Image (tube, rainbow, N blue to C red):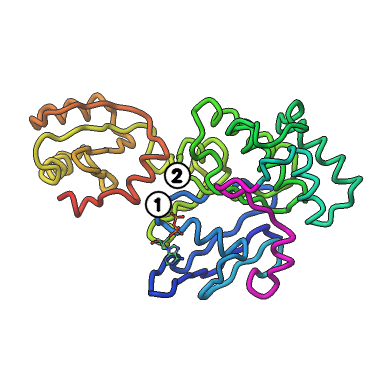
């Protein structure tokens, strides 16, 4: 059975905003799945529907087999959420916070105590667990939030923008921690992020969501492979559309070339960057040129950035 099954899921808010427009995806047990997209794409609305806080307008979603609309309590029991906003009580120790959460989820006290020890060790909270949460640094508190969500041993863990607002060092540390969770448990993780490097590093598969629709879905490597091994990027001083048209005529730019502002990105596929750059020079196009490997950012910009039609 899939851990998450989403079918034709839609949400139209009162007032008519179509935040989610009939999305479909499935996440296998044990998989780490990323929902990527710019602000306003519909990520939070999707997570809200999966975590039973937002009622779907139509379609269905199941968590560990439980329909979020018809069996919300069972769906909630099977899952746990780490919100962007902290929910731990700053005046209580880390341990107390976790104990209270365990009690709320009816975890037997003995078992809760053992889990808390284990989580403190896994999440690197050992030395802090008996200090008030208010004395923790931002990264430490985020780890406590994750521990809190794990006390009930959820089948599905939702992480909403887990590293937003953290400094780069703490962010890297937290990514290690999240990465290590997957190696230890059979838990399924669904995370939302707008950091593409994070998704590339953590996720088995990602869905790119744009204006309420899934525009790409697959393993990061598979999405990258669609752009080939190398691409050339150039800044155009003049008209981007005209430059693109002449690059296409010359056979340097394919159908999947795309523009964002004055920057033109040309996936090379079988062409060599040397030939491509020589052809660009021959066409008299001036501006900075560089060749590099594609990143998930390119996949994303191609699908959600300025369209070529708009640039032309
Ligand atoms: P994301 O999490 O990707 O930033 P959201 O799901 O928060 O996107 O928002 C998707 C769209 O739905 C946006 O246009 C947003 O303004 C709108 N929206 C979100 N919540 C509400 C609400 N409670 N009422 C009306 N519109 C909303």
Few, some or many residues within 10 Å of mark 1 (<14, 14–19, 20+)? few
In the image, farthest residue toward the front: 91
Q: Which stretch did the figure color magenta? A: 68-87
| Quadrant of res 272 | top left
Q: Position of residue 310 (x, y in %)?
A: 19, 53
In the image, farthest residue toward the right: 110
Measured Cα–Cα span from mark 2 to mark 1: 8 Å
Q: Residue at x 70, y 62 (%)?
A: 76
Q: Which residue is mark 1?
A: 39
Camera-nearest residue between 287 and 75: 75
- Give left or right: position of 300 versus 50: left
**Image quarter of the N terminus:** bottom right
Camera-nearest residue between 311 and 110: 110
Q: Position of residue 32 (x, y in %)?
A: 61, 46
Pointer 1 residue Cβ closer than 8 Å to ligand 1 = yes
Q: What label does residue 92 carry, if any?
A: none
Few, some or many residues within 10 Å of mark 2 (<14, 14–19, 20+)? some
Q: Are marks 2 and 1 in contact (CB under 8 Å)?
A: yes
Q: Which residue is mark 2?
A: 194
Q: Residue at x 16, y 39 (%)?
A: 247
What element does badge 2 sit on? loop
Q: Earlier in the sequence, mark 2 or mark 1?
A: 1
């Amino acid at each position: 059975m899939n851990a998450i099954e989403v079918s034709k899921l839609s949400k139209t808010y009162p007032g008519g905003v179509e935040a989610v427009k009939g999305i479909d995806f499935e996440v296998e047990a044990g998989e780490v799945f990323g929902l990527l997209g710019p602000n306003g794409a519909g990520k939070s609305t999707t997570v809200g529907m999966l975590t039973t806080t937002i009622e779907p307008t139509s379609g269905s979603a199941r968590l560990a087999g439980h329909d979020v609309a018809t069996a919300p309590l069972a769906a909630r029991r099977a899952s746990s959420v780490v919100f962007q906003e902290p929910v731990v009580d700053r005046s209580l120790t880390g341990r107390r916070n976790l104990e209270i959460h365990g009690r709320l989820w009816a975890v037997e006290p003995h078992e809760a105590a053992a889990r808390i020890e284990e989580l403190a060790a896994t999440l690197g909270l050992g030395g802090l667990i008996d200090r008030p949460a208010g004395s923790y640094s931002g990264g430490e508190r985020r780890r406590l939030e994750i521990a809190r969500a794990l006390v009930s041993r959820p089948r599905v863990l939702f992480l909403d923008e887990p590293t937003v607002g953290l400094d780069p060092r703490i962010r890297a540390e937290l990514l290690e921690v999240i990465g290590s969770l997957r190696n230890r448990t059979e838990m399924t993780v669904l995370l939302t992020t707008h950091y593409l490097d994070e998704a590339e590093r953590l996720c088995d598969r990602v869905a790119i969501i744009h204006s309420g629709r899934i525009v790409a879905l697959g393993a990061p490597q598979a999405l990258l492979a669609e752009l080939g091994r190398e691409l050339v990027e150039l800044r155009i001083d003049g008209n981007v559309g005209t430059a693109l048209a002449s690059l296409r005529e010359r056979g340097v730019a394919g159908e999947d070339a795309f523009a964002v502002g004055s920057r033109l990105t040309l996936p090379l596929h079988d062409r060599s960057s040397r030939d491509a750059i020589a052809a660009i020079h021959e066409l008299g196009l001036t501006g900075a040129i560089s060749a590099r490997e594609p990143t998930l950012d390119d996949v994303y910009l191609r699908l959600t950035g300025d369209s070529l039609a708009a640039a032309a």
